[in-house]
């Protein structure tokens, strides 16, 4: 039945087969499947072992790694991560030499579960890997293994001359919610590299952290466009009146993307003045700004607003109409 089943097209059947094998809990029979010439059965066995596997099963899985196909190797490694047996530690370390991004990510995740402080040195190089998921796995694994050592690693990185490493250090400190983060953020908001300033502003926004209004004003008027956009987004989301006139003035600028981001920022004020301006934009103007206005209004907590913007759901531009329709749906809590 498993061989006749397509796991992607018949997921419910595949899951039912797997559930039965898990319930039967026959380790020897499942281990026999690992030696099957049918790749699908090998993958089925690894998925079952992810639920019932023990140390002895992990040893058998490790023995099969070197002779497995790429897909089977991915499945074996992923299942070993879920089992979380310390027996797999050395195997995970060997798999750090693999080229396949999936196997690498699983191996790093595995070390995050069963690794020891000495393994952090082996994981650090993957913080700058070309694949995003590998970098994120390395960051999470380092934090999981040893919080204190991880914090030291990330604090060193935010001081590194390389901007990419400073960003990774920032991600690490924020991911572990380090109490050192606010002090480092204050420095990074003044960094000479615009990418660092943008990354720091996004952390302030995501983590709802305080920021000195005087510093925010400097950043809202920064020479770099992305910095200005990120800074004014914070001002908008926090409805900071001292910056409102800047945001409103930028809506009328000649640069369409400056106008677009200003419209989105204005939506954060959520008052009658902002509503009137956003509805005026919906009535006429560049379509991209009308879409931005609809998106901004859709984030408000005002079900009655849906009725006010309903006429624009019939707009001749289908993209504008869709944006308004989605905004109405959000305002009504999905009860369109």
Image: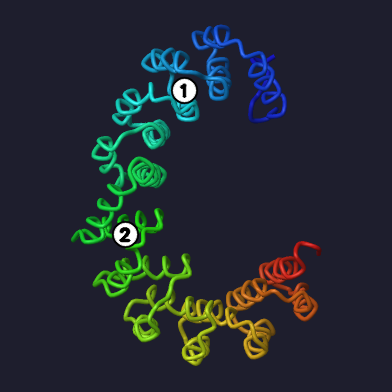
Dot 2 or dot 1, earlier in sequence: 1
On screen, residue 327 versus residue 292, left or right, reads right
Q: Which residue is mark 1?
A: 76
Quadrant (top left, top right, bottom left, bottom right) of the C terminus? bottom right
Q: Secondary structure at mark 1?
A: helix
The residue at the far left in this view is 161
Residue at 31% over, 28% down? 93
Residue at 26% over, 55% down? 165
Residue 259 at x, y percent in the picture: 51, 81
Quadrant (top left, top right, bottom left, bottom right) of the N terminus? top right
Residue at 58% over, 19% down? 44
Q: Residues within 10 Å of mark 1 (few under 14, many from 20)?
A: many
Quadrant housing residue 114: top left
Residue 171 at x, y percent in the picture: 36, 56
User: How many numbered callouts?
Assistant: 2
Quadrant housing residue 100: top left
Q: Nearest the camera: 173 or 135?
A: 173
Q: Residues within 10 Å of mark 2 (few under 14, many from 20)?
A: many
Quadrant housing residue 226: bottom left
Q: Nearest the camera: 79 or 149?
A: 149
Q: Which residue is mark 2?
A: 167
- Whole-angstrom CA distance, mark 2 to mark 1, is 33 Å
User: In the drawing, what numbered circle is on residue 279?
Assistant: none
Q: Nearest the camera: 301 or 72?
A: 301
Residue 335 at x, y percent in the picture: 81, 63
Report if the CB atoms under discs 2 and 1 are less than 8 Å apart.
no
> Is 43 placed above or below 33 here?
below
Residue 133 at x, y percent in the picture: 42, 44
Residue at 67% over, 81% down? 282
Q: Secondary structure at mark 2?
A: helix
């Amino acid at each position: 039945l498993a061989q006749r089943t397509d796991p992607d097209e018949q997921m419910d059947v595949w899951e039912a087969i797997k559930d039965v094998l898990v319930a039967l809990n026959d380790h020897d029979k499942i281990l026999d499947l690992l030696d099957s010439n049918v790749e699908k059965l090998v993958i089925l066995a690894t998925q079952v072992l992810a639920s019932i596997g023990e140390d002895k099963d992990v040893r058998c899985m490790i023995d099969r790694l070197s002779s497995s196909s790429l897909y089977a190797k991915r499945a074996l490694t992923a299942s070993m991560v879920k089992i979380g047996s310390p027996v797999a530690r050395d195997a995970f370390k060997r798999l750090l030499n693999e080229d396949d991004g999936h196997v690498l990510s699983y191996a790093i995740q595995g070390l995050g579960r069963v690794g020891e402080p000495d393994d952090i040195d082996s994981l650090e190089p993957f913080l700058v890997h070309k694949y995003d998921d590998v970098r994120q796995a390395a960051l999470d694994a380092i934090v999981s293994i040893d919080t204190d050592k991880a914090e030291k690693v990330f604090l060193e990185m935010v001081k590194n001359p390389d901007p990419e490493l400073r960003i990774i250090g920032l991600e690490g400190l924020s991911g572990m919610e380090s109490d050192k983060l606010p002090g480092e953020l204050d420095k990074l908001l003044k960094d000479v590299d615009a990418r660092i300033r943008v990354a720091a502003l996004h952390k302030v926004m995501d983590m709802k952290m305080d920021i000195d209004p005087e510093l925010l004003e400097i950043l809202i008027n920064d020479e770099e466009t992305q910095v200005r956009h990120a800074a004014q987004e914070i001002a908008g989301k926090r409805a900071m009146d001292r910056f409102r006139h800047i945001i409103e003035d930028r809506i009328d600028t000649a640069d369409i993307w400056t106008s677009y981001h200003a419209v989105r920022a204005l939506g954060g004020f959520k008052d009658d003045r902002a509503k009137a301006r956003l509805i005026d934009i919906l009535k006429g103007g560049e379509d991209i700004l009308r879409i931005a206005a609809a998106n901004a209004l859709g984030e408000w907590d005002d079900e009655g607003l849906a009725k006010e913007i309903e006429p624009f759901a019939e707009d001749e531009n289908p993209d504008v109409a869709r944006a308004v329709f989605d905004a109405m749906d959000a305002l009504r809590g999905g009860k369109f």
